[in-house]
Image (cartoon, grey):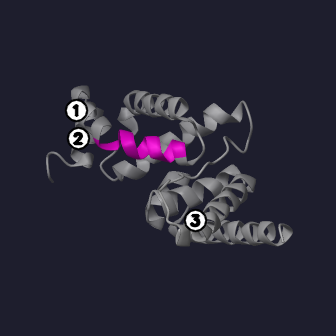
Amino acid sequence: MDPLSDHALMLQVSEGKTETLGLLYERYKRRLFGFFYQLGCDRQQSEDLVQETFMRVLRYRKTYTNDKNFMAWLFHIGRNVFNTHYSKQNRQGPQVELADNRMEFGAAEVELAFDRSHNTRQLEKALNSLTLENKELIVLNKFKEMRYKEIAEVVGCTEGAARTRTHRALQKLKTIFFELEKSER
């Protein structure tokens, strides 16, 4: 086993060598931040939730065992932090705002840019109308590019169930998106 692999480092942390947690933090802080941000948290909330996630990693380090996938275990903790934070407020959590990559367009591209912007707003509306669980599956699968096996570990189900739930969430998103399109015509 590579002594600098995520798994090896976390095993060291679980054995009491907590100084190695800094390496894992540096490797995963951006991915966790992106996870929270893409679920709709603002910058400050995302940073706070990353910090809280790593505090829980330290607190629950002894539960990490040799048979665990570190990234899935970390995101499972992050998911719990997110759910705890938002269970007091709104079960749907924060509202998603997709990144708006602004570019300068020539006259011929203005209509295409408008269509893309319109579609992005429609997608945001559709994502925000989903339940938190469905939003989370889509973010893990499409934005964080996790495999179904990893998603299953994060949400606590079988790989087949993760695949099915993600597929259903995407179908719901597609249905809502097209209903919004129809209602604007």
Which of 51/47 is in front? 47
Quadrant of residue 27 in the image? top left
Q: Is residue 62 above or below residue 148?
A: above
Is there CB contact under 8 Å for labels 1 and 2? yes
| Mark 1 vs 2, N-terminal side | 2
Which three-letter amino acid code belongs to the residue tagged 2? Leu
Q: Position of residue 153 (x, y in %)?
A: 48, 56
Q: Position of residue 24 (x, y in %)?
A: 28, 39
Q: Residues within 10 Å of mark 3 (few under 14, many from 20)?
A: some
Which three-letter amino acid code belongs to the residue tagged 3? Ala
Q: CA distance from mark 3 to mark 1?
A: 46 Å
Q: CA distance from mark 1 to mark 2?
A: 6 Å
Q: Position of residue 53 (x, y in %)?
A: 46, 34
Query: In the rendered structure, which segment of residues is drawn in magenta?
Result: 27-37
Which of 125/136 is in front? 125
Q: Is residue 15 above or below residue 132?
A: above
Q: Which residue is mark 2?
A: 9
User: Disc 3 or disc 2, which is closer to the eye?
Assistant: 3
